[in-house]
Image: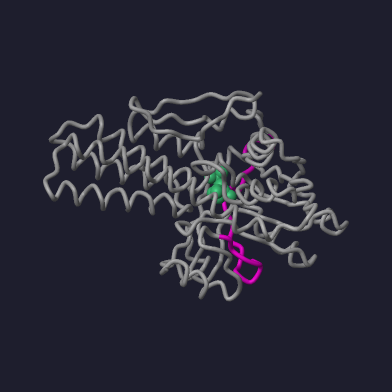
Amino acid sequence: MTEPFFTLRLDDDGVRILDQRCLPEAERYLLLRSAEEVARAIEDMAVRGAPAIGVAAAMGVAVELARSSDAELEAGLERACRRLAATRPTAVNLSWALTRVRERLAARIEAGVDPEALRREAREFARTLHAEDVATCRAIGEHGAPLVPEHARLLTHCNAGGLATAGYGTALGVVRSAAREGRIERVLAAETRPFLQGARLTTWELDRDGIPVTLITDSMPGSLMRAGEIDLVVVGADRIAANGDVANKIGTYPLALLAEFHGIPFYVAAPLSTVDLEMPDGDAIPIEQRDPAEVTCFAGRRISAPGVPALHPAFDVTPAAQVTAIITEAGVVRAPLAAGLRRQKSA
Ligand code: MRU
């Protein structure tokens, strides 16, 4: 019997996060007691995935206020929000969560709330965001499951699971709900070079749940689609522009093109907090450039000739035209995506 895991949790002594850098070898939890420690955990990918880093940031603000003196509360709030917002640029869930936290707490400070009450409200609000995210993922799963055919062989990329959210997952939420209805024959997890979220995290998470999963390299989907061995693709998203363009883990865009070429549906599962109506299209989405050492090294060992540069954009943009539908907690949005997303966001 495997022990249940949690991705992140706000305890009275700090933020506990499952250190995803250690998976699948070890399940090790970190205890983070300041906004700076949470910010580093986000930058170093100990906690990762768009919704999870948004919730982690809200928890980071709560622990920062817990250690700030009464006189320092307002400055502590501003400093924590600024530091946490600067950790990773692509996932809009981070600034979405921080804006909500900041506006709410700044209004309470303005209203002259007692410092202890402010600290308590910061904790409660972070826990509310956590609970909301789990409920949102479950709703995404319920809306997405009917799109999964019987005996489905489903391809996913990166990890958009319980590990990337407060729990249950977005793309893997769809998988979980469809699996409960007996419709998943097999999930194909693309390894997701260079950080290997597919190989290390998606296989671990699905295997623990007893959902059949097979690891493939990032170079295999084309020939598997040609051979008729993939029925649908479901991925998550870090930011969806107003026109429906989708930023997600690097390698998503070629999967969408392959799926279109082979007549296979390509679905994006994401909460409405990932939809950024202020971004007109995908070209405006900031793409995180990570340390090239993540590409030039593998498992701590250099794999390229010394001195040769490497590129490392962490995300790519899939044009709306290649997206069959976007699954949110409010339902399934089909083309024209722009109108459907606007309708859901304003409901
Ligand atoms: O760099 P990561 O591991 O944070 O990237 C994660 C992804 O690209 C996920 O697909 C995305 O955040 C959606 S998570 C529900």
Q: Quarter of the image holding residue 57? A: top left
Residue at image point 84% right, 54% down: 229
Residue 305 in view here = no
Residue 73 at what x, y percent from top left?
19, 38
Residue at image point 54% right, 56% down: 270
Query: Is residue 160 placed above or below 24 in the rendered structure?
Result: below
Does the magenta portion include 214? Answer: no
Residue 115 at what x, y percent from top left?
16, 37
Residue 132 at what x, y percent from top left?
43, 48
The answer to whether 205 appears left or right of 53 in the picture is right
Residue 31 at what x, y percent from top left?
41, 25
Residue at image point 58% right, 37% down: 293
- The foreground one among 282 and 265 is 265
- Count up the numbered dots: 0
Q: Main secondary structure of the magenta part?
A: loop
Does the magenta portion include 321? Answer: yes
Query: Is residue 12 placed above or below 234 in the rendered structure?
Result: above
- Looking at the rendering, the stretch of residues picked out in magenta corresponds to 303-327
Residue with the most extreme front position: 181
Quadrant where the C terminus sits is bottom left
